[in-house]
Amino acid sequence: MNKELMESMNILEKEYNISKDTLLEAIENSLLTACKNHFGKADNVKVIIDPDGCDYSVYMEKEVVETVEDPITQISLADARMIAPRHVLGDIVQIPIDSHDFGRIATQNAKNVILQKIREESRKSQLSEWQCKEKEVVTGIVQRYIGRNVSVDLGKIDAILPEAEQVKGEVFQRTERIKVYILEVKDSPKGPRISVSRTHPDLVRRLFEAEIAEVRDGTVEIRAIAREAGSRTKIAVSSTDPNVDPVGACVGLNGARVNAIVNELRGEKIDIINWDDNPAFLIENALSPAKVISVVADEDEKEAQVIVPDYQLSLAIGKEGQNARLAARLTTYKIDIKSETQARELGLFDDMDFGEEGFEGEYEKDVEPAEDEVPAEETSEAQAETEE
């Protein structure tokens, strides 16, 4: 029995990450419970378990008395001397208990104590394991739709991908492998409850860390991310090594690195720009691929006035304002975009005084349209105050 017990504990320790000490404690408590159910009390019952060989013994401590009033806690002097002649009144005698003598109900209750302890420890272990994985990306297998939510198998546990955390238009097939971002891990009577996301901006961050060694080792830093899941993401990067081009490192040879991430996000476009501590230059970069004539950034009000060539206005604002909106989220500035013609009509150029070096938060850059560039046919509102 001891060999089987040892093997069982080794399996539980390996598969459920339950320590052997915890299991031995559960066995001890189960034996005490069985004694209490069998004898009516177990205050004087002692259990000794050898952790190495899993040998155990159960005995009851009884006081030697002249007249026995409680046979559970007392033993007569005559009976005590039958066990060992040296005993005298007041001695404590240890009486071995054979667990095989326990009744069926007592044995079942003891078994339930062990099983309950195993369930509790397994749940605690799982909760601790998955709480350490919060804000990480894991690969799961789509199980089924539960209403509009999706059940995702993460291995030994299922997670829920809520409708609100799904990319609009994204449909999953059963057994499909997907990467998800662990939003939150909560405890529940049935075990850890895990919520995951496909829309969180940090999903992109973690994918970059997994795919790009320079991001993973800290050579390239992701300074800001703005995402409209399923459509477009803008990400600003910088480098701690002057010899490493942060944008080039993220894009990879022929776009191989970023394309791997785009494929995982099912075609979501990713704009990678250089971070700049000067907010005006950062805003110019964030409005890429549009070209910019000038940016005036007010750091106190977190507002920026941007002037672009007439033929770049639609590109700067983007379809349904997306480019400007993402640029605003990336930089945390409210961005007002005007075409060059509108700026001149409003006299905005008259108010700008740019020296050769400019001044903090403001600069001017002349842009000459290329011969083969034509003005965008699509017109947009000149005012693009971009708030979330």
Image: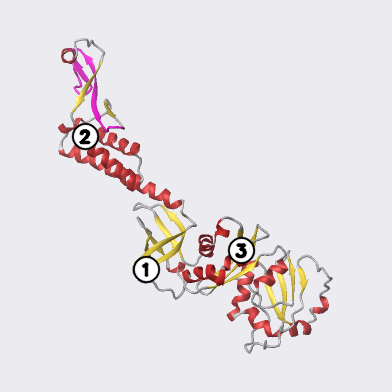
Q: Earlier in the sequence, mark 3 or mark 2?
A: 2
> In this image, 234 relative to 123: left or right?
right
Locate the N terminus and report the quarter of the image it occupies: top left
Residue 225 image offset from top left, x and y in percent: 59, 65
Residue 337 vs 261, above or below: the answer is: below
Is residue 74 located in the magenta-colored stretch of the structure?
Answer: yes
Circle count: 3
Q: Which residue is mark 2?
A: 37
Q: Nearer the viewer, mark 1 or mark 3?
A: 1
Question: Quick check: marks 1 and 2 in contact, CB under 8 Å?
Answer: no
Disc 2 marks which amino acid?
Asn
Instruction: Determine the secondary structure under disc 3.
Output: strand
> In this image, 318 relative to 82: left or right?
right
Q: Which residue is mark 3?
A: 224
Q: Which residue is mark 1?
A: 176
Disc 3 marks which amino acid?
Ala
**Residue at the spot x=74%, y=80% of the render?**
367
Residue 116 vs 170, above or below: the answer is: above
Which class describes the residues within 10 Å of circle 3: few (<14), some (14-19), or many (20+)?
some
